[in-house]
Amino acid sequence: MVQFQIKVDNDIPASNQLFNQIRFAIASRQFPPGHRLPSTRQLAMQTGLHRNTISKVYRQLEDTGLVEALAGSGIYVKAQGHEGGSKLTSPTYDKYPGASNIVKRSLDELLSEGCNLKEAREMFLSEIDWRLRSSARVLVTAPSHDIGIGELMAQELEPALKPLNVQLVPLEELNQVIDQVTLGTVVTSRYFIGQAEEIAAPKSVRVIPVDIYDYAQEIQLVNNLPKGSYFGLVSLSSGLLRATEVIIHSLRGDEVIVMTAQLVETYKINAMVRTARTIVCDQASFGAVKAALQIAREDIIRPPQIVCCENYIGAESINLLKRELGLG
């Protein structure tokens, strides 16, 4: 940090001493463009000057065009012209190191394609505006006959996409909701992407598919089950249960007896905890399975192993979606 010294016995007023020292620090690039000047409190402690005197010096520097005040942020050294090709500087660029190189590289690529600066500006602004409008609302959609899979997606996306509004919409109602909302992004599983795009594309609303969790650990668990084992599946989604049952049968055939239950099918869950060796459930169903096991515990010699799958959507898919929506 640059140290400023004020000579109280000097004929030059203290404010002029500080003004000239800061101006020299800027001219010599000890304070480069975009650099945040010390607060009036910091300089008062360093120099012994009153904060009002320092504020007056800062106003003088601003009047000369050397610095600029950003409300709620501080006083910053202004960039003069193109600064000889130096990196772009501002409080925002300081916050994201490397950002200026990304911006300049993207701009150079556009210019190399033959567009001019005005056209490049329009492209950047258009893309930013599009993403801002698309982020206004997230519409999670799935068919009514398997709305449970939509509930799973919405439950996982709500905390991940805060502060965006996440709304679950049956696929059959998507057309009507888009007409009312106009702004937003439709999110769905790849299983339903074709139907969702057919509805949303004519209305210039983008659709982003999410990839499901790979269930590698759960598949390994199924492969290791002894022959004749009863294996339980509990989920909000009837479609997920059907698909999983088919996959397990393809892996083990009749070696494993599969029992399935939706969250609302309490009687099936109660029977499952008494019979199954292992039960795999989604996060929404975990509480119901644990409750059923607690009730039946006295009647069970060997309680089943309960495995809760905390994710339906793959973690990388959520990260990609967040970037698309401008959340990181």
Image (cartoon, rainbow, N blue to C red):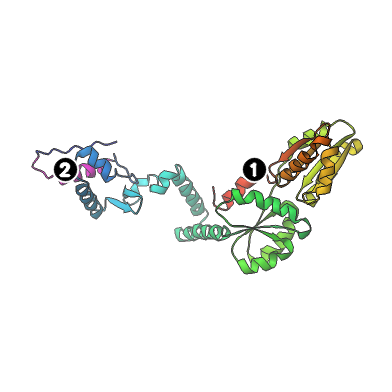
Q: Can the viewer see residue 144 in this picture?
A: yes
* Mark number displayed over residue 156: none
Q: In which quarter of the image is residue 187?
A: bottom right
| Tag 2 secondary structure | helix
Q: In which quarter of the image is the N terminus?
A: top left
Q: Nearer the viewer, residue 47 or 19?
A: 47
Query: Quick check: 32 left or right of 184?
Result: left
Residue contact at pointers 1 and 2, CB within 8 angstroms: no
**Mark 1 belongs to which amino acid?**
Ala
Where is residue 231? Give x, y as percent.
84, 38
Which of pointers 1 and 2 lies earlier in the amino acid sequence? 2
Query: In 3D space, how far apart are the residues under numbered discs 1 and 2 (Cα atoms)?
Result: 57 Å
**Mark 2 belongs to which amino acid?**
Gln
Q: Which of 276 and 201 is in front in this view?
A: 276
| Tag 1 secondary structure | helix
Q: What stretch is highlighted in magenta?
A: 10-28
Q: How crowded is mark 2: few (under 14 residues within 10 Å), some or many (20 or more)?
A: some
Q: Which of 290 and 11 is in front in this view?
A: 290
Disc 1 designates what residue? 315
Q: Is residue 185 magenta?
A: no
Where is residue 252? Give x, y as percent.
87, 36
Query: Quick check: 83 left or right of 263?
Result: left
Where is residue 99? Give x, y as percent.
46, 45
Where is residue 300? Give x, y as percent.
83, 34
Q: Is residue 20 magenta?
A: yes
Q: Is residue 134 above or below residue 7?
A: below
Q: Is the magenta stretch mostly helix, strand or loop?
A: helix
Q: Residues within 10 Å of mark 1 (few under 14, many from 20)?
A: some
Q: Which residue is drawn at 23% across and 43% down?
A: 22
* Mark number displayed over residue 17: 2
Q: Residue at x 60, y 61 (%)?
A: 184
Pair 1/2: label in front: 1
